[in-house]
């Protein structure tokens, strides 16, 4: 193209201006080629220019013969100068291109480093890291997986998470050298590979390693039509693998330290819980044995009324024990993380009626009022768990107040409109303000406790939180304690 | 048959528990036969055909669920499940297989007596009169006219609400498992769509409340969280018991 333009220009100058030697015009074409394409193209243009000039403008025209010595010198000079200009310009251009690529690579690396360093957990940063890697290296898909073995990995992040991962087949693995620029891709075919190899695209794997060996891999696929990975792209992938390896290692160390702390605290908690539970279990057992002992004692003459009272006290204390055992079971399920809510859409009165009805039989003189706002949306909850939670709140209100207390259960839409707030409150003695915040963690080491107090509320909290709700305690307008549960209502698009 | 002479079969493998429950039931005038295994339960069932079965689910050998299925092949004899807390799933399965009611251990003797009485009343009264009409206090359901009235005033139910209410009243004095109601009213493919039930039961409750300002029917249908609904009979609601009028 440049050659044709230059030839036309030379022809024009040659015919119109009658300038003896217009060959330097070709140097323009050579320079243009060098700037646009590179050294080799520029030298090729110079050779082409010499041939065309010789053929078209040097006498005898339309042959490659050279008539005069001056003409020969001109041709040699044209070739030499063209080659030198081409080489110099091209070198400059190549340097710029490399610099630009390095800058891109450095920018990408910097971004990845920052993402991994600022994220709370490596897992949070990885989705944007794989996205960036895919964009920078021209991959159609990049994913990061962890596992010591390429055949048994767990995917942490994937640019196409919804499509299934390709079966393990022949892929290129980066063999890394001390000198990063000499890293090379080696094709391997794993023994576990599916028999049919995927020819549509090429899969690359870069091992992610920590100080103690392989942690996982970065996998990258690109269309097989795409050119082979450049040195810079390879280097970027290798550097990303190092960064991810460091992030995962750091996280592992942090996790191990946290686990140690949790297990230490959990031991403290267990002994506090055990002390308290032992006490709570023994108290009703002592009452039961005392009452049963009196009933069985032949030397005690009891009236029918006294016998009934003793039996009723056995029954009541047994119920108390049963409630405690239920709560202990629930607590262990909550702590073990096996409390999986089975949520459904349930109208509020269906949720409040059963526990209110059961509590009504145990009020013993207390007054229980239920006020539910009209037209509340249904809740998206596990009815069994909420039933337990509400039963615990009502039980708590009944057990820790005098028999003249008024208890109130209210339900209303939260101000934000996306949750329903259920409050159980009373006009009883309440709880000192400095204790309110600790009601749900009564078994925290060092905190004193009243008998039976806390486990029920801790269970209520565990269940409410398992359903994505929250629980809080405050002073009630009635004067006593108010405990509120906030639970999500159904999303508008739910049926 | 008088209530006090009813024959009960008590199936429970724990000796102390079985002895205590049997003593209480005998004390109330029931004739109680006690067995400890599923095999003995089936044998006793075939030999004597009791009026009511109290069945522990966690039995050695043939389990409680299998006993329910066996009995339900040819009889509607009331079955009350005695379940422990760790048998929640079995309990629902037993109800779905045809058991009438359940009591979670540990239960009070007063509760046990109330459930036994309700189940025996149901067995005697069956459901409704010769034309299938059901009456509970002021409430009456007339299947021939697809009509529900309270004190003679019509309660306007949608066709779906009517079907559901009728299915619920087929479980008077018992527990109606959610899956069974859904299958009966909406079809088998809806057996897990519990929110349909919640919504329609809520609508029926509101209409009954509006028709019965005195609140006599409040508590007729109560939720049993995670299981279904309990439908009380007139006596449990504290209403005079009548089973239909001519």
Image (spheres, rainbow, N blue to C red):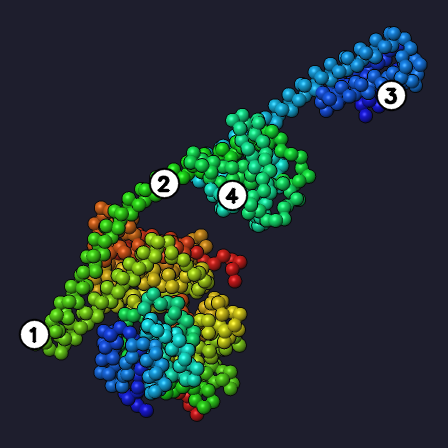
Q: Residue at x 10, y 76 (%)?
A: A302
Q: Mark 3 lies on which chain?
A: A
Q: What percent of the width, then of the height, locates residue B125?
A: 38, 87
Q: How far apart are marks 4 and 3 (CA)?
A: 62 Å
User: Badge 2: how crowded within 10 Å, few (<14), some, or many (20+)?
Assistant: few
Question: Residue placed farthest to the left in the image?
Answer: A299
Q: How far apart are marks 4 and 2 (CA)?
A: 24 Å
**Residue labelled with disc 4:** A150
**Residue labelled with disc 1:** A300
- Residue A256 is labelled as 2
Q: Nearer the viewer, mark 1 or mark 4?
A: 4
Q: Which residue is drawn at 83% across and 8% down?
A: A73
- The answer to whether dots 2 and 1 both sit on one chain is yes
SS at circle 2 = helix
Horizontal placement of A123 versus A401: left or right? right
Q: Residue at x 24, y 64 (%)?
A: A320
- Residue B232 lies in what quarter of the image? bottom left
Q: Distance between the residues labelled 2 and 1?
A: 63 Å
Seen in the picture, residue A96 relative to B213 is either above or below; the reply is above
Q: Which of marks 2 and 3 is in front?
A: 2
Q: What percent of the width, then of the height, locates residue A169?
A: 59, 45
């Amino acid at each position: 193209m440049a050659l044709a333009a230059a030839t036309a220009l030379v022809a024009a100058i040659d015919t119109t201006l009658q300038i003896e030697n217009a060959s330097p015009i070709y140097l323009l074409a050579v320079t243009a080629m060098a700037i646009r394409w590179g050294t080799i193209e520029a030298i090729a243009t110079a050779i082409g220019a010499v041939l065309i000039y010789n053929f078209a403008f040097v006498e005898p025209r339309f042959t490659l013969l050279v008539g005069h010595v001056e003409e020969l010198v001109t041709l040699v000079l044209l070739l030499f100068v063209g080659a030198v200009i081409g080489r110099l310009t091209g070198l400059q251009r190549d340097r710029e291109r490399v610099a630009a690529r390095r800058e891109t690579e450095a920018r990408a690396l910097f971004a990845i480093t920052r993402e991994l360093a600022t994220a709370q957990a490596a897992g949070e940063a990885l989705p944007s890291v794989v996205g960036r890697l895919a964009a920078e290296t021209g991959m159609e898909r990049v994913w990061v997986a962890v596992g010591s073995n390429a055949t048994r990995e767990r995917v942490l992040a994937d640019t196409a998470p919804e499509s299934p991962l390709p079966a393990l087949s022949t892929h290129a693995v980066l063999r890394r050298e001390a000198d990063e620029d000499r890293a090379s891709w080696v094709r391997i075919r794993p023994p576990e590979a599916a028999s049919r190899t995927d020819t549509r695209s090429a899969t690359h794997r870069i091992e992610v390693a920590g100080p103690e060996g392989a942690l996982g891999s970065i996998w990258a696929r690109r269309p097989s039509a795409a050119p082979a990975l450049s040195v810079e792209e390879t280097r970027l992938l290798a550097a990303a693998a190092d960064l991810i390896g460091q992030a995962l290692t750091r996280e592992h160390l942090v996790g191990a330290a946290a686990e140690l702390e949790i297990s230490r605290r959990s031991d403290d908690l267990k002994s506090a819980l055990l002390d308290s539970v032992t006490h709570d279990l023994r108290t009703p057992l002592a009452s039961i044995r005392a009452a049963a002992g009196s009933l069985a004692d032949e030397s005690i003459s009891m009236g029918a009324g006294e016998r009934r009272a003793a039996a009723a006290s056995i029954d009541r204390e047994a119920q108390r024990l049963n409630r405690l055992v239920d709560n202990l079971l629930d607590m262990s399920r909550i702590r073990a993380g096996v409390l999986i809510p089975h949520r459904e859409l349930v109208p509020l009165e269906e949720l409040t009626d059963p526990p209110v009805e059961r509590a009504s039989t145990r009020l013993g003189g207390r007054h229980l009022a239920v006020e539910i706002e009209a037209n509340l949306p249904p809740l998206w909850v596990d009815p069994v768990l909420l039933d337990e939670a509400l039963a615990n709140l009502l039980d708590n209100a009944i057990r820790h107040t005098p028999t003249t207390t008024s208890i109130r259960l209210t339900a209303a839409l939260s101000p934000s409109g996306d949750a329903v707030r259920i409050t159980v409150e009373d006009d009883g003695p309440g709880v000192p303000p400095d204790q309110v915040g600790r009601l749900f963690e009564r078994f925290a080491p060092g905190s004193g406790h009243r008998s039976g107090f806390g486990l029920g509320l801790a269970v209520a909290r565990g269940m409410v939180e398992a359903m994505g709700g929250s629980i809080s305690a405050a002073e009630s307008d009635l004067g006593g304690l108010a405990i509120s549960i906030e639970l999500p209502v159904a999303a508008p698009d739910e049926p | 048959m008088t209530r006090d002479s009813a024959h009960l079969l008590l199936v429970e493998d724990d000796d102390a528990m079985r002895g205590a429950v049997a003593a209480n039931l005998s004390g109330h005038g029931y004739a109680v036969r006690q067995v400890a295994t599923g095999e003995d339960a089936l044998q006793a069932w075939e030999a004597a055909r009791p009026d009511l079965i109290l069945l522990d689910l966690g039995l050695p050998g043939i389990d409680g669920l299998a006993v329910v299925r066996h009995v339900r092949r040819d009889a509607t004899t009331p079955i009350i499940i005695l379940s422990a807390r760790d048998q929640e799933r079995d309990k629902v399965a037993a109800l779905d297989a045809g058991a009438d009611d359940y009591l979670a251990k540990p239960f009070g003797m007063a509760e046990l007596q109330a459930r036994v009485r309700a189940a025996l009343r149901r067995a005697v009264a069956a459901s409704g009169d010769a034309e299938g009409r059901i009456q509970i206090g002021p409430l009456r359901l007339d299947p021939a006219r697809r009509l529900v009235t309270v004190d003679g005033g019509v309660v306007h139910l949608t066709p779906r609400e009517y079907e559901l209410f009728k299915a619920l009243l087929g479980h008077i004095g018992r527990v109606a498992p959610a899956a069974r109601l859904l299958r009966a009213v909406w079809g088998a493919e809806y057996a897990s769509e519990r929110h349909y039930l919640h919504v329609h039961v809520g609508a029926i409750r509101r209409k009954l409340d509006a028709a019965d300002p005195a609140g006599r029917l409040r508590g007729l249908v109560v939720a049993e969280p995670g299981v279904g609904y309990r439908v009380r009979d007139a006596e449990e609601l504290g209403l005079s018991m009548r089973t239909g009028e001519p």
